[in-house]
Image (tube, rainbow, N blue to C red):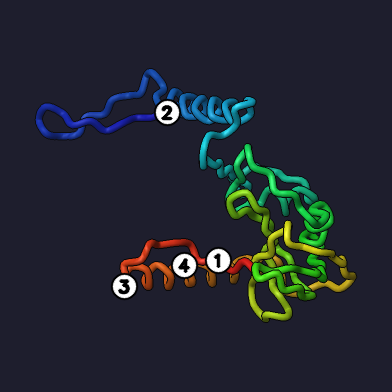
Amino acid sequence: MKSYGLEGSDGGAAVADDMIGYDTLMQDALRGVVRAALQEAASPRGLPGKHHFYITFRTHAPGVVIPEHLRPLLMEPALTATSHNVVVTDAIDMARVRTSIRAQGKIALYYRDEQHRETRRVIWPFAVGYLDAVRLIMAWCEMRKGFRHFRTDRVIAAEFLEGRYTIPRAKLRAQWKKELEEECTRATDTARRWRMPITAAGLVE
C-alpha cells in the first residue's frame, strides 16, 4: 500500500492512503495504449506515413533471465525500427552476421558505396540497426581505421572469416556510441552557428 503526501488545511502535510491503486490503473492504461498501437501496426493498413516504433526491454532489471544465445539480440536493440510498409532487401545473410556478432567474428565485405565505388573491407561487426527503411551493420573498419555503418543492400559479397577480434564487443559499442554522440554535438553546434537545419550525423559508407 502506497501513501501520498497531501497539503492539509493548515498548510502542513497530511497523508492519505491510496485505496484505489492508481499506480496499477495507470500501468494498465499505458499497456493498453501500447497494445492498441501494435495491433494497428500489425493490421493490413500498417504504420501510416513516416511513423516508426522503437521497442526495447529492461533486460538488466532484477530477476530477468535471458538465454545466452539470445542476449546479443535482446540486450543490444536496434537503433530504430523500420516502417511496416517499406522493405529493403538485404544482400547479405543476416543470420550469419548475427552469428559473427555473437562470436566476435570478422567479416570481409565486398561493398559498393554511395558513389558506386567497390572495395573490400574487413570489418568487426558489433551491432545491427536501421536508417529509415535500410538495415545497417555497425562495425569497426580495418581499412578506414574507424567506425562505419554499412548498408546491407549495398553488399556485393561477403566472406565470414575464421579470425576473431579481441576487443570486447561491449567495449567497441560503448566507444562507438561515445564518438557518435560527440559527432552529433559538433554537427548540431555547426548547424546552429550557420543557422542550418540540424540533421543527424552519419558514418554510412
Describe the element under mark 2 as helix, strand or loop: helix
- Determine the residue positioned at 78% across, 59% down: 102
2 or 3: tag closer to the N-terminus: 2
Residue ID for mark 2 = 23
Q: Mark 2 to mark 1: distance in Å?
A: 41 Å
- 7 on left or right of 2: left
Q: Callout 4: few (<14), some (14-19), or many (20+) C-alpha neighbours within 10 Å?
A: some
In this view, the residue in front, 160 or 35, is 160
State the residue in front, 170 or 157.
Answer: 157
Between disc 3 and disc 4, the foreground one is: 3
Q: Position of residue 138 (x, y in %)?
A: 67, 64
Label 1 vs label 3: CA separation?
Answer: 20 Å
Which residue shows up at 84% across the image and 64% down it? 157
Looking at the rendered structure, the secondary structure element under dot 1 is: loop
Q: Residue at x 67, y 80 (%)?
A: 144
The mark that comes first in sequence, 2 or 1, is 2
Q: Is residue 50 depicted above or below 43 in this figure?
A: below
Specify the amino acid type for callout 4. Cys
Instruction: Give the residue number, with chain letter if any, for mark 3.
Output: 193
Q: Position of residue 90 (x, y in %)?
A: 76, 52
Residue at image x 31%, y 72%? 193
Q: Which residue is mark 1?
A: 202
User: From this viewpoint, is residue 185 visible?
Assistant: yes
Please name the residue that numbered disc 4 is placed on.
184
Q: Give amino acid for label 1.
A: Gly
Across and down, in percent, residue 159 comes to 87, 67
Residue 77 in the image: above or below residue 34:
below
Disc marking residue 41? none
**Mark 2 in CB contact with mark 4 (< 8 angstroms):** no
The amino acid beneath tag 2 is Asp
**Label 4: element kind:** helix
